[in-house]
Image (tube, helix red, strand yellow):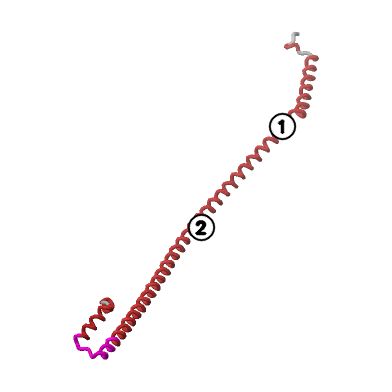
Amino acid sequence: MERLFNLDIQLISDSCLTLIAVFVLVMVASNLLFNPVREFLKNRRDRIAGDLEDARKNSEEAAALKAEYESKLKDIEKEAERILAEARHKAVEGQKRVNEEAKAEADRIIAQARKEAELEKEKAADEVKQQMIDIASLMAGKAVQGAIDVNIQNSLVEETLREMGESTWLS
């Protein structure tokens, strides 16, 4: 009988031994080669997953920090605006105060100048009165000395007035 593929016991046993040897080699290779590669790939997968999780957490933290900084920035801008408004208000108040002080000082200086002018006016009036008294006593002395007639007295008065000047009488 002819056999298909020449199957005999020897071929079957060799095939079984070959299969067993391949199976043993696969198991040994799996333990020695594939398991470390699988472990390496698993560790790499875990590390990448951890890195992705860390990146997600860092992204969330960055977003939270960004929101916090933006709110702080808004608060700082509000605070800066409040400080500027307060400084403007103080500047306006200071300007008003300086203007009031300057006006008060100017009023005081004007009052002092008026007072001094009034004193000078009184002093000038007193001097004019004194000069008039001196002139009157001089005239009286001259009138008594010589019993001067009216023409001489008039000429003496006119001469005295010219000596005093017209500005004295006008003030």
> Which mark is on residue 102?
none
- Amino acid carrying label 2: it is Glu
Q: Are marks 1 and 2 in contact (CB under 8 Å)?
A: no
Q: For the N terminus, which image quadrant? A: top right
Q: Please check the rendered image and state whether residue 79 is part of the magenta-colored stretch, yes or no.
A: no
Furthest toward the front, the residue is 146
Instruction: Answer with the quarter of the image where residue 21 lies.
Output: top right
72 sits left or right of 155 in the view = right
Q: From what the image shows, is residue 17 above or below residue 90?
A: above
> Can residue 31 be seen here?
yes
Judging depth in this view, the residue of 160 and 88 nearest the camera is 160
Give the SS element for disc 1. Answer: helix
Q: Which residue is mark 2?
A: 79
- Highlighted magenta segment, given as a residue range: 138-151
15 sits left or right of 88 in the view = right
Residue at screen point 78% across, 25% down = 24
Q: Which residue is mark 1?
A: 38
Quote the CA–CA distance across marks 1 and 2: 60 Å
Q: Please check the rendered image and state whether residue 148 is part of the magenta-colored stretch, yes or no.
A: yes
Rendered location of residue 22, percent (x, y): 76, 22
Rendered location of residue 44, percent (x, y): 68, 35
Instruction: Answer with the quarter of the image where residue 59 lies.
Output: top right
- Amino acid carrying label 1: it is Arg
Residue at screen point 49% across, 59% down = 83
Mark 1 burial class by Cα count in 10 Å: few <14, some 14-19, many 20+: few
Rendered location of residue 89, percent (x, y): 45, 63
Mark 2 burial class by Cα count in 10 Å: few <14, some 14-19, many 20+: few
Mark 1 and mark 2 lie on one chain; the one further toward the N terminus is: 1
Give the SS element for disc 2. Answer: helix
